[in-house]
Amino acid sequence: MKKSYKLLLFFFLVSGYISYAQEPVNPVAVTDSTKKDSLNYYDMTIEQLLSLKAHGVPSELEKLINSLISVASKKPLNVRESPSIVTLVTAEEIKNSGARDLIDVLRLVPGVDFGVDVQGVVGIGMRGNWAHEGKVLILLDGQEMNEILFATTQFGNHFPIDQIKKIEIIRGPGSAIYGGYAEYGVINIITKQGGDINGVSVSGIYGQTEKDFMRRNINLSAGKKIGDFEWSVSGMMGQGQRSDQNYTDIYGSSYTMIGNSALNPAYANVGASYKGLSFRAIGDFYKTTTQDGYDAIYPKPYAQNFNSTYFELKYLWKVSKKLTITPKLNYKNQSPWKTPQGDSIDQTYLKTATRSTANITASYNPTRKINVVFGSEYYKDMAVDHLAGDTFYNGKQTVSFYNYAFFAQGLLKTRFVNIILGARYDKHNVYGDAFVPRVGLTKKYNKFHFKALYSNSFRAPAIENINLSGANGIHPEKTQVLELELGYQLTHNSIFTINFFDITTKNPIIYYSIGAGTDAYTNQGNTGTRGFEAEYKVKDTWGYIAINYSYYTAAGKDKSAAYSVVQDPSMMLGFASSKVNLNASIKLTENLSINPSGTFYGPRWGYNSVDTGGYAQLSKFNSVFLFNLFLKYNTPVKGLSIGFGVYDIFNEKFVFIQPYAQPGSLTNLPHAPLPGPPREFIFRLSYDLNFKAKTTK
Amino acid sequence: MIKPKKISFGAKLLLLFLFINGISTKCVAQDVDYKAYTLFVYNFMKYVEWPEAQSKGDFVVCVFGESPVHKELTGLASSKKLKGRNIIIKTITKPEEAAGCQLLYVSASKSGNIKALKDQMAGKPILIVGEREGLAKKGAQLSFVTMDDDELKFDINKKEIEQHQLKISSQLIALGILVN
């Protein structure tokens, strides 16, 4: 079936749902059921005044768009006035969609995409830009998940999405607050804490394709809040595979990914807090296998593990009603890309890196209209190469660096506009300094809102970038981003937003090879994209429908050959310039919901073969339409819900394309596209046992 | 090989958007809910104590300037009493007309008059409620404020309340935000 017909069919399907779903909605009843009876309304108790909203009883949508998020400013602000282009993903949306992993969740976010890096690892892209190595910061309960050797984060059956309370996503720069891993975006994952869990939760997922299982994971959480004391313990363990397809390298050699593309997570998260004092420990042990070499496949699979532990001690000191000071200590120990000796032909990698961080942040509110956040941060990195005979660039098996930073931000809210000014200065003992200011104007005027943002950001070179930079050294890459968002609440339960962006990155850090097995990093050329993202969302008691469209173009942008598509200058390697997402949930009955979701990708470009001269060849990949359907049922057994669904119903067999390359090289040839899971049938089960009776949805 | 598309992708998206929007625009987005403001005003009447001489007869609420709250207050007055007293709603256009009012509601459009009102009403047993945020710092005893998450709250100028011979209950203070 042609993609366009599938898309139309899909749209009609959705439209049908909307017509059905809208039918029983009484606008008057939704707007304010209490208005029907004035006597009852005015008999509300004085305590009930606490729940009153300035714009009346909020609809389900208004609850969402008026909810406060802090990822973009530290100071909690509502989504429409938060000084970044943001997306808020709720636990409800994740659970309803039946999402298998974080790729499924983030794929539905405008501008977010995924590509293959090396050795079977999938990384993130943002607005057409490859962001895998240190350009998008992934925070999980405040811990920076990016490993510090290459600054990557690995996706695919990795993080425990069943335990997520919400995800706050900045689809633009965040360096002025978060530093050198937040050049293109921030994904702030917040898991359920003691008070949210209030008991014990168990959940599991099983996914099966026509050929083999794709995942079998279990989650367990327990937690409670008792007065000022709150605790939670959660864990996840499982087995997964990237795909059941064959991986074919650019020379045409293949291997089956069944049994050779393991994605096995093991994760634990412990948190405790008493009044302002909190402690957290996370262990993340992600074990994978691959048979992918670099350009050519290997004759046998090998293990590749990503082990990390994180610790945090934090104290929220409320000095006065106006001043809060938060000192924080963090420590993380990581062994990413770990390939045991003898397991692989030439990919043995045995390095450990640690980062110790001290941060102090003050937040001062002299008035309700003014907020000032300022502070400083110091971290020390240490890396050890455990492989006998291997050394870092300093000729030793250990290397260490340090960095200090100062940051400040002022927020002024006036009747006409909110003004935000911020900046961060980082100084690293090897690669030098980076100064990233930003300015933003935001405001909502009843139904309308706007955001005008200008931000500088940077990518901090990671330990291996420094190590492999050679005589030229390495410097932070710098980015300037202009963003404008306009939004209008069309109806009581629907909103339309559109934003325009222009990203210019100077001296990006590029991977290249100067000979077989000689890896190197350097600053080279420029890159960037411009485009827009539009989203329409309708949400009410019957459910919700969100449709978004994201578009980028690289036309007119000066860009490095590493990301270029010679045949089409408007495109970036690996990423579709057009992407449409749908995420919907329709309640068929009080306990049964049908949840369609999907992504339409426009054509993409990527390397998948070599010519007779041995040079890698670019090919255009057809558009892809991934459509998923999930049924969720809350059983009569209190707390027990089950779900069944199909991901990639049309069996489009999405492949992850490598979004960078070294054109013209005969020593550094790219990876061929990596198959993802094809059509997959999933079964979910979850059970929440509350310590106390608690309303469940 | 990629086949040419008959309908452009953007056109499909536009059609979809227009279709959905056409269905859902039958509902209108929420404007400011003055019924909520009225409910607060009603509770101000209940939880603020006027001097003995002002606690008999009709309770007069004056609305200074144009505000949709007038309609809601009129609805309130027709269905509720205040401790057995009738509630009378008046519209005034000049500060001088406020004599005889127990509660003066200053609409957003008349916020610029707050200092003049403060001087004119100094010491008199009248509760001045500002519709616009910030008026409690400029002369009103109470003024509304919309929080970031759209919660409706009110500022309290306790000093001004006392100067006007009024007493505010601790329950009401607990709900509001003291500005001094």
Image: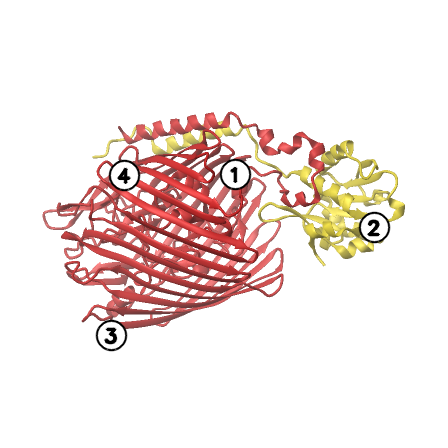
Q: CA distance from mark 2 to mark 3?
A: 81 Å
Which of the 4 image quadrants contains residue A548?
top left
The amino acid type of the residue labelled 4 equals: Gln
Same subunit: marks 2 and 3: no
Nearest to the observer: residue A643 or residue A612: A643
The amino acid type of the residue labelled 3 equals: Lys
Q: Which residue is label 2 attached to? A: B121
Q: Are marks 2 and 3 in contact (CB under 8 Å)?
A: no
Q: Is residue A148 above or below residue A485?
A: below
Q: CA distance from mark 3 to mark 4?
A: 48 Å
Q: Residue at x 71, y 40 (%)?
A: B39
Q: What is the letter of the red chain?
A: A
Q: Which residue is label 4 attached to? A: A208
> Which mark, residue A462?
none
Q: Which residue is label 3 attached to? A: A396
Same subunit: marks 3 and 4: yes
Q: In the displayed structure, does residue A597 sit left or right of residue B164?
A: left
The amino acid type of the residue labelled 2 equals: Met
Q: Nearer the viewer, mark 4 or mark 2?
A: 4
Q: x%, y% of residue A614? A: 12, 51
In the rendered image, is residue A670 in sight?
Answer: no
Q: Which residue is label 1 attached to? A: A61
Q: Are marks 4 and 2 in contact (CB under 8 Å)?
A: no
Q: Nearer the viewer, mark 3 or mark 4?
A: 4
Q: Are marks 3 and 4 in contact (CB under 8 Å)?
A: no
